[in-house]
Image (spheres, grey):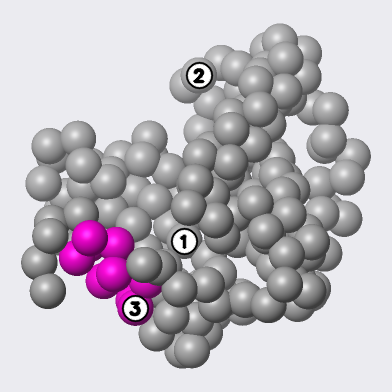
Amino acid sequence: MVKHYYTNADAYEICKFTFPADCRNCGELSIPSTYFGNCLSRPVVELEKGKLVVENGIVEAAIAIESKIREFKCDGLKEIEDLMTHFNELGTSKECRVIAIGSTKHGVYETDFGWGKPKKSDVIHVLHSRIFSLCDSKDDNGGVEIGLTLERSEMENFNTILKEHITSIIGCD
């Protein structure tokens, strides 16, 4: 049985998740795919904590993220005016927030600035906790490398929950 590490009062707290989204394919912009520069937006998904920490919370999160992606594809510039406001709120607020950075599409292990391809790529972000990074796998097998930054106590809780889930999946003690 997975234990919950929150109080009932926290159940209605709004959790925010933001992720990078490429604006080059938005109909309003006619930027070629060969453009080398920053053309990103940061859609923000909001969901109550109580919906996230239940058994099917990951499904609720996936549905909310998919809905935001569909909305973004229809009108990628809809929230662009509020981009900096959202970003500043995410950076200074103590509310429940998770920030995704990076992408598996960047091909970081294929990058060569003249001294060879990297053997290891890490994203270091010291300003915030609750950030996870994504990049393509160095093994070139279609995998994904995931980095995670949490406060020490949150990381300990995460490890405990992860071990409980892995144990229940593989049926070992």
Query: What crowding class fits label 3: few (fewer than 14 Cα within 10 Å), some (14-19), or many (20 or more)?
Result: few
Is residue 36 shown left or right of residue 110? right
What secondary structure is the magenta-colored segment mainly?
A: helix
Q: Is residue 160 magenta?
A: yes
Q: Amino acid at mark 1?
A: Phe
Q: Earlier in the sequence, mark 1 or mark 3?
A: 1
Vertical placement of residue 87 versus 164, above or below: above
Quarter containing the C terminus: bottom left
Q: CA distance from mark 1 to mark 3?
A: 18 Å
Q: Earlier in the sequence, mark 1 or mark 2?
A: 2
Q: CA distance from mark 1 to mark 2?
A: 26 Å
| Residue occupying the far bottom of the picture | 152
Quarter containing the N terminus: bottom left
Percent of width and height locating residue 153: 48, 89
Mark 3 lies on a secondary structure that is helix
Is residue 109 shown left or right of residue 53? left
Q: Amino acid at mark 2?
A: Ser
Q: Which residue is mark 3?
A: 160
Percent of width and height locating residue 125: 51, 72
Q: Which residue is mark 1?
A: 132
| Residue occupying the far front of the picture | 1
Percent of width and height locating residue 147: 37, 64
Q: Earlier in the sequence, mark 2 or mark 3?
A: 2
Q: CA distance from mark 2 to mark 3?
A: 43 Å
Residue 6's disc is none
Is residue 121 shown left or right of residue 98? left
Q: Which residue is mark 2?
A: 33
